[in-house]
Amino acid sequence: MKTVTKLKRYDMYINGEWTSPTDGEYFPSHNPATGEAWCEVAKGSAVDVDNAVQAAHAAFLSPEWRKMTPTQRGHLVSKLGELIAENVETLAKFETLDNGKLIREMRGQLQYLPEFYHYYGGLANKIQGNVLPIDKPDMLVYSVREPLGVIAAITPWNSPLYLTTLKLAPALITGNTIVIKPSEMTSASILEFVKLVEKAGFPAGVVNVVTGFGMPVGDALTSHPLVRRIAFTGGEVSARKVVENSAKNFASLSLELGGKSPNIVFEDANLDNAAMGIIAGIFSASGQSCVAGSRAFIHKNVYDKVMEKLVHRVEQIKIGDPLQEETEMGPLATEAQLQRVEQYVDWGLKEGGKLICGGKRPENIENGWYFEPTIFEHADNTSKITREEIFGPILSVIPFEDEDEVIQLANSTEYGLATGIWTQDIGRAHRVSAEIRAGIVWINTYRSVSPIVPIGGSGLTGYGRESGMEVVHEYTQTKSVWVNTSDKIIEDPFKWV
Ligand code: NAD
């Protein structure tokens, strides 16, 4: 008889308490490497969301949080960074168990994550208002930047802690409180992380986590009347619902959605580096990255050479258990995602794409949601597979003849997230960068991120920016304070001043 092992069970974190769901229900979270459930997560409801938002609102108004100086808030946020640094290995393991991404990628991400907390921790006491050069006599006018209130943070499954951090750190240093709703597929690492939030010493209610599905949890959260800002990362369909919800509470909104980002290789590029950059861009994280470089435009004079380098390396990619150090590509995060990738391969073939390598599940792996790194060659940029975000390990390669043509091809997408440009010609690098419609341009590199650098895009990629200094403005609002410094008696109440 098969022994049934009891799964690890996660409650929600509301008002500083581990809270079981009001409906008493839990749902399984699966390990993509095996396809098996490995833990259970609380299935939140609209009531749980309301409890969390009310707790966050009360914490926002509480003297304990309101009266804390920016320096003190900064110290707390930096402390959280230190605690993450002490717990990298554990957190990385939870992320890999949930999303199937390589342990070495998750470890790398987590080792770097404290930098975000230190960057924002240090920024906390540098957010200033202004004394305004007012054009009226006897007036002193100054502006201060104030927090908004309760922030709703909604994240997808691919990089749970990194994508939460981009919202959490700027929200906290500016004095907001937050309710986090992680992806229903990857809640565990956030719930483990929140133990560190508690340990860092944040007052109860400042950080809350509600788990569950888009409907009803995400829906109830984004339409809640006490939510003042929604920071959303995810797909287009959910984003449209979130935008509709924001019409109910007039919460301000940032949307970080998908991309169909190009890597452009000019004939003067260092071709070895370009090939490595293309591979890193699309096959890291099995293509499940918003900035995945899923289109490669290669100049016709170097096309064959680059293709040879690409295919040679791609055929050596080690696919397998993401917890093994030597693995280079793990599984896709869900079975549905695997089926979606297969569907795109079918469409690619039907629409005349030439399959160069991959295109199927690996034959030597029995369980889990694995797919081979896949390269398609296309004559142009018009087919479904070259235009839509797949979020899987499929690269579309298209040759080009000149700069104008490739700029037009690169821009012929509804997304506007990232672009890689590979060239040794400095003039060309900046000329092309200026013409590209994207929020991030990487020249002779790809996929680098830093707390100092804004991320975001336009079009179907959404709007708003995360990371960098300017994001603090998105988590604050300006208050203008007018002071009459004159001691004259006001004689005419109807006189325009
Ligand atoms: P998804 O849209 O299905 O889910 C994202 C989150 O939204 C989840 O937490 C989900 O529960 C929630 N959600 C679903 N319906 C909702 C609703 N009606 N109201 C509120 N919340 C709702 O996306 P996914 O499949 O988890 O992630 C993949 C997508 O995320 C891709 O499109 C990818 O490009 C995008 N992404 C973007 C970035 C970026 O920074 N631009 C980073 C990573 C991923």
Image (cartoon, rainbow, N blue to C red):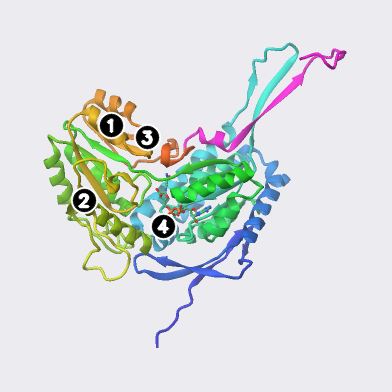
Q: Which residues are magenta?
A: 468-497
Q: Which mark's residue is nearer the viewer, 4 or 1? A: 1
x and y percentages locating residue 77 in the rendered image: 55, 45
Q: In the image, is the residue at mark 2 within 8 Å of ligand 1 by its beta carbon?
A: no
Outermost residue on the bottom side: it is 1
Q: Secondary structure at mark 3?
A: loop
What numbered label is drawn on residue 375?
2
Quick one: quadrant of the C terminus?
A: top right
Quick one: label 3, few (<14), some, or many (20+) residues within 10 Å?
many
Q: Which mark's residue is nearer the viewer, 2 or 1? A: 1
Q: Secondary structure at mark 2?
A: strand
Q: The residue under label 1 is which amino acid type?
A: Gln
Q: Are marks 3 and 4 in contact (CB under 8 Å)?
A: no
Judge whether residue 99 can be spotted in this image. yes
Inspect the magenta stretch and tell me whether residue 325 lies in it: no
Quick one: label 1, few (<14), some, or many (20+) residues within 10 Å?
few
x and y percentages locating residue 433 in the rendered image: 31, 29
Quick one: label 2, few (<14), some, or many (20+) residues within 10 Å?
many
What numbered label is drawn on residue 92?
4
Q: Which mark's residue is nearer the viewer, 2 or 4? A: 2
Judge whether residue 76 can be spotted in this image. no
Disc on the earlier residue, 2 or 3: 2
Q: The residue under label 4 is which amino acid type?
A: Ala
The residue wearing badge 3 is 438
What numbered label is drawn on residue 408?
1
